[in-house]
């Protein structure tokens, strides 16, 4: 019966370690987000830069 308790305790410790690791990652991301330079709202979005709306030209091979 002590084997069950030991394995349960081991699972709980593993769960705590994962939780702490996730909290650390969240904290790092939060500080990165806060220290990131402010983006100009009038500037072109880098994700869609150079995309032309409408039908796309046929690519010839």
Image (cartoon, rainbow, N blue to C red):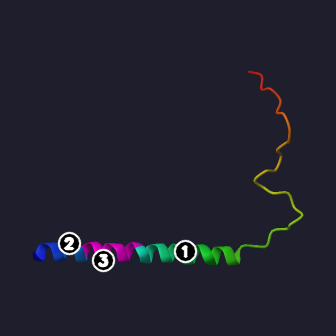
Task: Please say whether residue 12 is one of the residues in the magenta stretch.
Answer: yes
Marks 3 and 2 sit apart, C-alpha to C-alpha, by 10 Å
Other residues around mark 1 within 10 Å, as few (<14) / some (14–19) / many (≥20): few
Q: Image height check: is 50 above or below 14?
A: above
Residue 43, image quadrant:
bottom right
Q: Given this view, does label 2 or label 1 mark the residue nearer the observer?
A: 2
Q: Give the mark, 3 or 2, whose residue is nearer the N terminus.
A: 2
Judged from this view, the residue extending furthest toward the left is 1
Q: List x then y, in percent, for residue 42.
A: 90, 64
Q: List x then y, in percent, for residue 34.
A: 69, 78
Which residue sits at x=36%, y=77%? 16
**Residue where numbered disc 3 is placed:** 13
Judged from this view, the residue extending furthest toward the front is 1
Which residue sits at x=50%, y=77%? 24
Q: Looking at the figure, which quarter contains the N terminus?
A: bottom left
Q: Main secondary structure of the magenta part?
A: helix
Can you tell which mark lies on residue 48?
none
Q: Which residues are magenta?
A: 10-18
**Residue where numbered disc 1 is placed:** 26
């Amino acid at each position: 019966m002590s084997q069950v308790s030991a394995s349960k305790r081991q699972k709980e410790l593993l769960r705590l370690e994962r939780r702490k690791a996730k909290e650390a990652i969240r904290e790092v991301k939060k500080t990165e987000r806060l220290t990131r330079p402010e983006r100009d709202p009038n500037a072109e979005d880098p994700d869609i830069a150079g995309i032309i709306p409408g039908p796309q030209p046929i690519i010839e091979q």
